[in-house]
Image (cartoon, coloured by chain):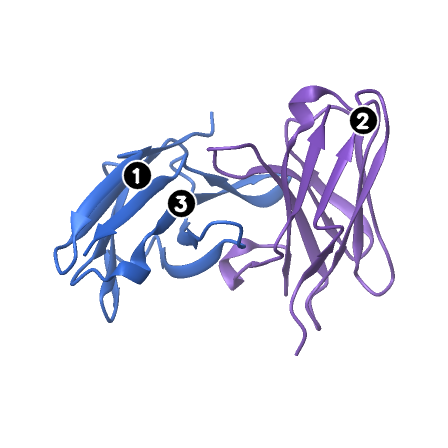
Amino acid sequence: GENVEQHPSTLSVQEGDSAVIKCTYSDSASNYFPWYKQELGKRPQLIIDIRSNVGEKKDQRIAVTLNKTAKHFSLHITETQPEDSAVYFCAASINQGAQKLVFGQGTRLTINP
Amino acid sequence: ETGVTQSPTHLIKTRGQQVTLRCSSQSGHNTVSWYQQALGQGPQFIFQYYREEENGRGNFPPRFSGLQFPNYSSELNVNALELDDSALYLCASSLVPVPDYGYTFGSGTRLTVV
């Protein structure tokens, strides 16, 4: 079946510290794993993604790691800033007739000044 | 380059009514995917339209239907509304019918069924 589990559901960190959000997926055929940031009342915005042929990808303060054997991937945010506060969603691509994304339940990240 | 626009932004409907939501895809994108996002949940795939044809469907009943026009804009129709249909409805356009090349999400339509 298709399922993406995301943890934790809420995360509170001090400004300047690191934040880590973890996801596991069930479909071994999934090959694309994006992360979205959604601020209150706004659209989800892609912040970073990784494909199954890569183990790690970094973009400034944001990094994603993928362990295909264990079927889990993680988002790492370093040197957190107040504007990082938002809900973050992981997703995995599934091919069931159409190529679609299956999303995790989301993590509400709060950065405390 | 224009982004993805959705209309209306908010609406309230009564149980049993019908609703039509609209999505204008980003310039150059021929694929529109619709997602339902219940409060506190991640988006769930409803269906996808590619070059005016339905290209796949999630676990939603037939009262959820759609349409894509020659300019690649799209509509989502929901008949016989139920209270559980209350959610944020997101459309995402893409260059091709695979998410790997990046979805551009609209801001969504918040539907409340009373």
Labels 1 and 2 within one chain: no
Sort mark 2 into few (<14), some (14-19) or many (20+) by Cα contacts within 10 Å: few
Cα gap from disc 2 to disc 3, whole angstroms: 28 Å
As drawn, is B66 to the left or to the right of A100?
Answer: right
x, y percent for residue A14: 14, 52
Q: Residue at x 34, y 42 (%)?
A: A108
Cα gap from disc 1 to disc 2, whole angstroms: 32 Å
Residue A71 visible in the snapshot: no
Q: Chain in purple?
A: B
As drawn, is B82 to the left or to the right of A52?
Answer: right
Instruction: Give the residue number, with chain letter if any, for mark 1.
Output: A23
Labels 2 and 3 within one chain: no
Q: Residue at x 80, y 25 (%)?
A: B14
Q: Does residue B21 lie above or below A46 as drawn?
A: above
x, y percent for residue B40: 46, 33
Sort mark 1 into few (<14), some (14-19) or many (20+) by Cα contacts within 10 Å: many
Residue type at mark 3: give it.
Answer: Phe
* Label 3: element kind: strand
